[in-house]
Amino acid sequence: MILRKNLLLRLLTTALMVPFCLNARVYTGLEVFLSKYTNVVKNKRVGLITNPTGVNAQLLSAVDLLKQDSRVNLVALFAPEHGIRGNLEAGAHVRNQRDSKTGLQVYSLYGGRDHRPPPGSLDNVDVLLYCIQDVGARTYTYIWHLAECMSAAAAAGKTIIVMDVPNPLGAVQVDGPTVEPRFKSFIGLYPIPYVYGLTVGELARYLNREEKINSKLYIVPMANYRRGMNWHDTGLPWVPTSPNIPSPESACCYSITGPLGTLSVVNIGVGGTLPFQIVTAPWIKADHMAYIMNTQRLPGIRFRPIYYKPTVGLFKGQSTQGVQIHITDVSKLKPTTTCVAIMDYLRKNCKEFRWKLNKYRNSNREGFDKAMGTSNIRQMLMRGSSWQSIARTWQSFDNTFADKAKKYKIYK
């Protein structure tokens, strides 16, 4: 028992002792766990929170790896939005069911009134493992599934272990407004910036202490990971985190165009071959937009004129034009600032640009306000404020958050 406790205490430091080697790939928390720390769950009943992104570098599923490992007693699965096998669209309810491949019971985290493990589902579980790829944006629901599972584990006296993964945005920049209390939702459950500059393991540590979740939380760190890495630096394969995030590029651009997409006024590529990577409409002038956006000198990004005829979604079958987003340095990228700069351009140069309500289930709030966590940005844009002045409104909070987050960081 003493040995196992010591192993848990070492989870936060051991991977950091592996020196970074040039050209050495990153080893995820799952791989480090299977290599070093299965003793932590010896004689424990294990529940796994995962989806198709929970894989090792050989693309073998965490479900299968843990089920086949005689050192791990995997007894249940917990499914976030999109389901264990990733076959459900955004917002679709996930049902409690049996996993057809392993026969394990699958408990839904995305099917009831809340997003916690269903009543009774933790009765036969001692330890929860979390193994899901993050995209680094507050509105992506997986981090809130984790927060709710941490809260449920704390209430039930269970341990939760997070297997850390890279942040596609480099885990460097903090950018965007926080969530005001009246806009609290499952795309903003706690007051953090839109882009939080942490890995999921680091964010879990932050939430556990700063938001007083107080779960018995442990992190299995990655080996060879360093801040500012783009995805290709990690040497890891990319598995779509959801149907419209098929690539690391889409994952990074999600934080830029995702809020804009809630307005349903421009096409952002969802359903096509460049999801979240474009901004087009019949009334945009591609060359002008690309030229003006590039003169703004937004960090880590370039804009290219693009001409596009959508086959699905907004403006289906119509000729549109606009820009494609090319990220040149993910460590310098300011996604939320870039989003507001794009909207500032559209407001100034396109008379057709207008605000449009996007009705959420059981809510009459505007989708954009809900995503941003505040109505202040929309109101400032409508008043004609510049993107620079809007970005300054969240700088003080972001600085405070970044300062508080320092003590929860694992990687340099």
Image: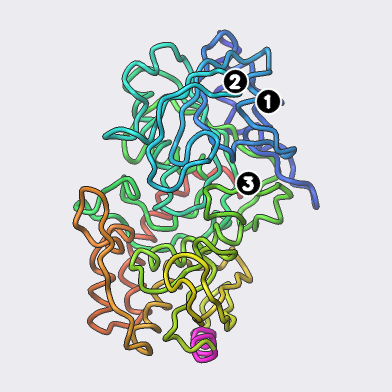
* 288 falls in the magenta region: yes
Q: Alpha-carbon distance for marks 2 and 3?
A: 21 Å
Hey, what amino acid is under mark 3? Val
Per the image, the residue denoted by label 2 is: 102
Q: Main structural element of the magenta stretch: helix, strand or loop?
A: helix
Q: Nearer the viewer, mark 2 or mark 3?
A: 2
As drawn, 401 above or below 314 = above
The stretch of residues the image draws in magenta is 287-296
- Which residue is rendered at x = 38% and y = 54% of the image? 401
Task: Identify the disc placed on residue 34.
Answer: 1
As drawn, 101 above or below 291 = above
Hey, what amino acid is under mark 1? Leu
Hey, what amino acid is under mark 2? Thr
Q: Secondary structure at mark 3?
A: loop
Q: Position of residue 242 (x, y in %)?
A: 52, 48
Whichever of callouts 2 and 3 sits on the residue coming sooner in the sequence is 2
Per the image, the residue denoted by label 3 is: 239
Q: Secondary structure at mark 2?
A: loop
Q: Alpha-carbon distance for marks 2 and 1?
A: 19 Å
The extreme front residue here reads 317
As drawn, 272 above or below 343 = above
| Number of marks present in the image shown | 3
Q: Nearer the viewer, residue 155 or 269?
A: 269
- Which residue is rendered at x = 30% and y = 70% of the image? 393
Q: Position of residue 171 (x, y in %)?
A: 54, 54
Whichever of callouts 1 and 3 sits on the residue coming sooner in the sequence is 1
The answer to whether 340 appears left or right of 286 in the picture is: left
